[in-house]
Image (cartoon, rainbow, N blue to C red):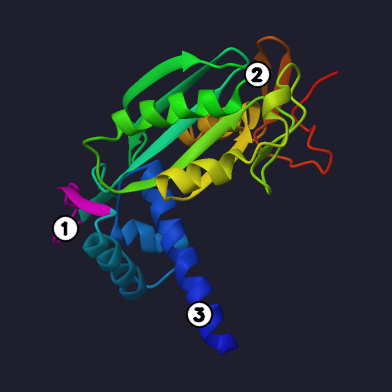
Amino acid sequence: MAQKINADIMKQNNRNEVLRLIRKEPCSRIKLAEKLGLTRAAISFICEELLLEGLLEEGEREASIGGRPATVLRLNPDYGVFAGVHFTRSEYVVGVCDFIGNVKKQKKGLVDPLDAEGTLQNIRMDLKELLENENNLLGIGITAPGPLSREEGKLGAVSNFLAWRNFSIVDYFEREFGCKCVLDNFSNALAYAEYSQNPDCERRYLELIIDSGFGSAVAIIKNGVSLLECELG
């Protein structure tokens, strides 16, 4: 049993690595095998699974330097969509992007610091409107000012947000939309986004946010036990 579990974990890790590399840059099976140190047979098996599941699609052929030219694999932008909900202390932004991160549509609204339920009802309606003609909602990412708890999916003691304190915001969206939802500090999310869109950038950098207060994040995300790792001062 343990061997099967380990094999399943290794298989999933290899699938994730293939997707990560192709997200960074469309790539042929041969180059994937070289970069990951796997056999061509193993890579071909993984890629065929991902193609059949619709996560990948075949693109153009590489220039041939002798022999049959290799076919480039890329993420399928139409595999599904992700939704995002971003909170500030005064407004929210909801949006939908395709599988490779291209924003398809978005909408803004006002946040009432004294009425969490009312604000969330508005967000729910806006998001359902944006998702009306979309298929396969893969997940929802939620960002908010800190402090907050990722593990519990709750907002913390955000200043001037008494109605939102300890509100189970992840549970709310998972219940309403029936998909996986994650919550993170806005500063951390920006650092993730910077690296995601620029994978060749410096691996260590500071993201500084200046809004109604100061916030920061580092490229190598550090999750503190006090929930205050993104707060300055």
User: Which residue shows up at 60% across the image and 22% down it?
Assistant: 115
From where the camera sits, is residue 120 visible? Answer: yes
Query: In the structure shown, which secondary structural element does the residue marked by tag 3 occupy?
Result: helix
Q: Nearer the viewer, mark 3 or mark 2?
A: 2
- Residue range in magenta is 56-70
Residue under pointer 1: 66
Query: In the structure shown, which secondary structural element does the residue marked by tag 2 occupy?
Result: loop
* Residue 179 versus residue 94 in the image, above or below: below
From where the camera sits, is residue 37 visible? Answer: no
Q: Amino acid at mark 2?
A: Leu
User: Which percent across, then down, holds residue 214?
Assistant: 73, 15
Residue 204 figure quarter: top right
Question: How much space separates mark 3 and mark 2, taking CA atoms?
Answer: 50 Å
Q: Amino acid at mark 3?
A: Ala
Residue under pointer 3: 7
Question: How much space separates mark 2 and mark 1, taking CA atoms?
Answer: 68 Å
Q: Give the number of the disc on residue 114.
A: 2
Quarter occupied by the C terminus: top right
User: Which residue shows up at 57% across the image and 30% down it?
Assistant: 143
User: Which percent across, then down, holds residue 95?
Assistant: 39, 27
* Residue 9 versus residue 111 in the image, above or below: below
Q: Earlier in the sequence, mark 3 or mark 2?
A: 3
Q: Is residue 10 magenta?
A: no
Quarter occupied by the N terminus: bottom right
User: Which percent across, then down, holds residue 60?
Assistant: 16, 46
Q: Earlier in the sequence, mark 2 or mark 1?
A: 1
User: Which residue shows up at 24% across the image and 39% down it?
Assistant: 134
